[in-house]
Image (cartoon, helix red, strand yellow):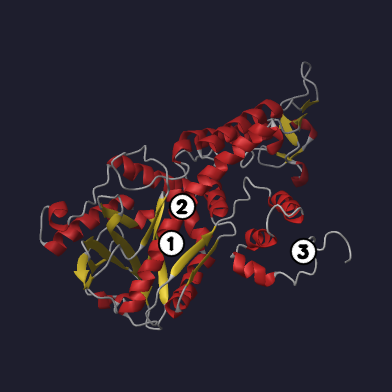
Amino acid sequence: MFQKFLSWIRQVVSKMLGASNIKQATHMDVDVSSDMIVALEQWERMYRNEPDWKNSTTVPLGLPAAIAGELARLTVLEVKSEVSGSARAEYINEQYGRLLAGLQQKIEQGCALGGMAFKPYPTDAGQLIVDCVPADRFFPTGFDASGNLSGGVFVDRYTRGRQFYTRFECHQLTGTTYTIKNVAYMSYDRDSIGVPVSLDAVPQWAELDSELTLDGIARPLFGYFRVPLANNIDRDSPLGVSVYARAVDTIRQADEQWSRMLWEFEGTELAVDISAQAFMPDGNGGVKIPKRFQRLFRALDLGDNEKPLYQVFSPEIREEPLYKGFQHILQLIEFQCGLAYGTLSDPQTVEKTAEEIKASKQRSYSTVASLQAALEHALNDVVYAMDVWATINHLAPAGKYEVSFGWDDSIVVDTDKEFAQRMQMASAQYIRPELLLSWYFGCSEEEARKMMPVQTDEADPFGLNGDA
């Protein structure tokens, strides 16, 4: 479907501007290489646990979704972000909070496909809703000299009976002029774009402007979260790559090894081969075996002078070597995806020193920190877009705002141990008590001082040395 969307976008942009050279006429480049198309479609199938190698003998484990889900969980784990500074900021923070509430699921999809766009838009109820668009329905179309996104095309589909509607929303920033164009198409074939129709054909699109031009805009009115990995599929592509892009072949090996283990258990299942003469005939040339014993007993041609009446089939299971090989593959996947050993693999099989464990955790921390930085950049852009729409639609009084972020670092930091150390330093008066409270509660020193009780003994501000 990704390839179809891309083909349709080229047709639509060309028709909208009446130009044969899309890039020259619109300053937008929607060209995506065939390698990226293949890769994106592969990542999407893997995320749905429908990889190319799924068949009757290979059972996929669902590792891609697990990897994307775990990295998304670690990225937004206990994230604290708010908008403050004015009445405008309070309004934006209320709208912004709804996005944060369901952020983990969206980031998981973004990690799986290499990116996700967050596009705020106003509603008739005076709210700002954020549309989260996955990478297979959002196409970056331009970047400025600093590498910042300057435009993109969003694809939205709606089905009503046998009618398939497709809407293309093109955003483009040129200097400080921002242009948004909407066009809709209808087809009776899911795989065809069809013919142009009015936006009124779909009730949800009826209030949209076919074209809107805004002046004084500093950056695009959407945030783009891009997985911060180098694109080794197409180095010239603006698209991000999946968090498991470098482990595709290894994930396939893990699925195959897991299938071998399942076959080993099934193939070595205990069975008793008994002469068919020991069972009652079923009248159809076969024998009757009680239902509860059908897995245990097998009727064979036994019981003559050279063959025993029965024989037990119970071969030795090669569980240990297969399991060890499977764990080694999982550890390689963890390394390729920037995860600590033991995230996917069995922690009991990871034999390492304390320094090696710390280095492994640092790998996860580095991966997550990069994802958090990319997400923070995208969310800052989302808040900026909210502020612009609040001004255009007079949703809240004008005012300045500040966005704050607090990211959890418990991946490599033992919070309890850190607290104990800081507590000892505060008790020994090596640091001021308000610094301890400020760190623990994530507030300013002034707010920390307000939380502190009246100090009657400056030598024991926390009352650690017994009753006064």
Looking at the image, is mark 2 or mark 3 earlier in the sequence?
A: 2
Residue that numbered label 2 is attached to? 373
* Residue 115 location (% of width, % of height): 40, 52
Looking at the image, is mark 1 or mark 3 earlier in the sequence?
A: 1
Residue that numbered label 1 is attached to? 379
Per the image, label 2 sits on a secondary structure element best described as helix
Give the CA separation, mark 1 to mark 2: 10 Å
Kind of residue indicated by mark 2: Ala
> Comparing marks 2 and 3, which lies closer to the viewer?
3
- Between residue 112 and residue 418, name the one nearer to us: 418
> Comparing marks 1 and 3, which lies closer to the viewer?
3
Answer with the quarter of the image where residue 35 lies. Answer: top left
Q: Quadrant of the C terminus?
A: bottom right
Residue 194 visible within the image: yes
Give the CA separation, mark 2 to mark 3: 41 Å
Residue that numbered label 3 is attached to? 458
Looking at the image, is mark 1 or mark 2 earlier in the sequence?
A: 2
Residue 57 visible within the image: no
Dot 2 and dot 3 residues touching (CB under 8 Å)? no
Answer with the quarter of the image where residue 319 lies. Answer: top right
Give the CA separation, mark 1 to mark 3: 44 Å
